[in-house]
Amino acid sequence: MANIYDLAYDLEKGLRESEEFQDLKQSYENVMNDPTTKQMFDNFRDTQMNLQQKQMQGEEISEEEVEEAKKVVELVQQQEDISKLMEAEQRLNTMINDVSKIITKPLEELYGEDEQA
Amino acid sequence: MANIYDLAYDLEKGLRESEEFQDLKQSYENVMNDPTTKQMFDNFRDTQMNLQQKQMQGEEISEEEVEEAKKVVELVQQQEDISKLMEAEQRLNTMINDVSKIITKPLEELYGEDEQA
Ligand SMILES: [Ca+2]
Ligand SMILES: [Ca+2]
């Protein structure tokens, strides 16, 4: 029987060498290496995190804050390097989610049995 | 370059054939196939979920509820098949967490870089 950890490291290597990850890495470095772009991206992430945190803690989000967040999103979407990075993140997320679904299938089958009976 | 999905399916097969998963499966079936044990286990899971949900929604949990939950835990821990199942779940969770850490390492390295700089 193959060792789980060996198989996990094979998959990690595959992910690392994948076009999706290499694209993400390049896009991330392009954004990080330009101070103005980095600042814009950091600002965007901060705004997102702030809103998420408020939502999770059940705090109210004002109309003003929603408008402000929309503006920040519009701004970053116009910046080519940032929108490329966001697309690359989306593609990698999809891949990671697919992988996660595949490897947790045995558990889902086991615990799902009961419901179907 | 190896296909990510092939590697993920190899890992899924490895997990499915692992002693940890086979143990979990057997333990789960032992619990599910005895109506009294199943009832006790379902009751335990319901109590846990209820408390978790209340905690997540910021609802207050009364001392009475905490005491009741403790009793349910003590009860299931005395039931051999259930405590075996809980141990098997714990072992599989550890394995899945390890695997998850391994395969998300490239992402952590990429996004962690910025903080270290
Ligand atoms: Ca960097
Ligand atoms: Ca069953």
Image (cartoon, coloured by chain):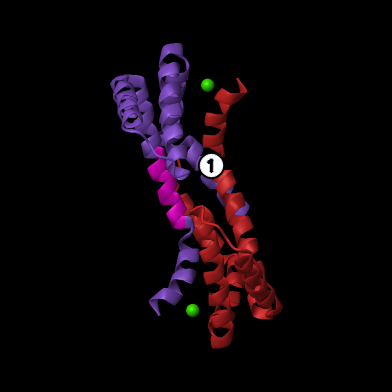
Chain colours: A purple, B red
Q: Is residue A106 above or below residue A66?
A: below
- Give coordinates of residue B69: x percent, y percent: 62, 69
Q: Is residue A103 above or below residue A15?
A: below
Q: Indicate whether residue A98 is drawn in magenta.
A: yes
Question: Which chain is disc 1 placed on?
Answer: B
Quadrant where the C terminus of chain A is found in the figure = bottom left
- Give coordinates of residue A42: x percent, y percent: 45, 23
Is residue B94 something that shows in the picture? yes
Is residue B19 found left or right of A45 in the rendered image? Answer: right
Q: Indicate whether residue B76 is drawn in magenta.
A: no
Q: Main secondary structure of the magenta part?
A: helix
Q: Which residues are magenta?
A: A92-102
For label 1, the residue is B104
Is residue B17 found left or right of A105 in the rendered image? Answer: right
- Give coordinates of residue B77: x percent, y percent: 69, 74
Amino acid at circle 1: Thr
Q: Nearer the viewer, residue A95 or A71?
A: A71
Is residue B34 something that shows in the picture? no
- Residue in the image at 45% along x and 32% along y: A50
Quadrant where the N terminus of chain A is found in the figure = bottom right
Count of numbered labels shown in the rendering? 1
Q: Is residue B82 above or below residue A106?
A: below
